[in-house]
Image: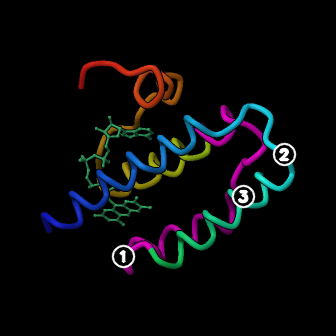
Amino acid sequence: PADSIALGRGTWRLLHSMAAYYPDKPTVEVQNDMFAFIKIFSKFYPCPPCAEDFRNWLKSHTPDVSSRSGLSRWFCDAHNEVNVKLGKPEFDCNLIDQRWKDGWAD
Ligand code: FAD
């Protein structure tokens, strides 16, 4: 449905942008907060079947909250998991900063 497409697009924008602005060297408190955010997000993402699949994926893919680059890669992998499920092409995670931090025309 159109709503879930717009919701997904907007949510990925938020999540990848949060990762792009995450510290290179986060304190333990910041790491714990990001870890908690992801867990809580996975409970409240307002597409119940999407959220359930995401929670299942989380069980075998612990969030890498150790650095900006690690978190960015982790969200890229999470997004690619959904891309594959939906039959979309995988995104090249080496391009994550161009897309979500430094910017390119899209
Ligand atoms: P989107 O997938 O929304 O991507 C937006 C932009 O992000 C792309 O144009 C591209 O520039 C960039 N991008 C693409 N892949 C990556 C990547 N791997 N890393 C970084 N940037 C990337 N929809 C469903 O139908 N079923 C589901 O189960 C489902 N689960 C979801 C779970 C979560 C946690 C989220 C946030 C969304 C989920 N969605 C799901 C929505 C779905 O992922 C898309 O957002 C939606 O289909 C719209 O797709 P889109 O083609 O506009 O691009």
Q: Are marks 2 and 3 in contact (CB under 8 Å)?
A: no
Specify which label sits upstream in the sequence, 1 or 2: 2
Q: Secondary structure at mark 2?
A: loop
Horizontally, residue 16 falls left or right of residue 29, namely left
**Residue appearing at x 61%, y 63% in the figure:** 38
Q: Nearer the viewer, mark 2 or mark 3?
A: 2
> Residue at the right extreme?
28
Overall secondary structure of the magenta section: helix
Pointer 2 local density, CA inside 10 Å: few below 14, some 14–19, many at least 20: few
Horizontally, residue 27 falls left or right of residue 50, namely right
Q: Which residue is mark 1?
A: 46
> Residue at the left extreme?
2
Horizontally, residue 41 falls left or right of residue 34, namely left
- In the image, what residue type sits under mark 3? Thr
Q: Which residue is mark 3?
A: 62
Residue 17 x/y as whole percent: 47, 40
Confirm or reject: label 3 Cβ below 8 Å from ligand 1. no
Residue 100, above or below 55: above
- In the image, what residue type sits under mark 1? Pro
Quarter of the figure that contains the C terminus? top left
Residue 7 x/y as whole percent: 27, 61
Residue 102, above or below 73: above
Q: Which residue is mark 2?
A: 27
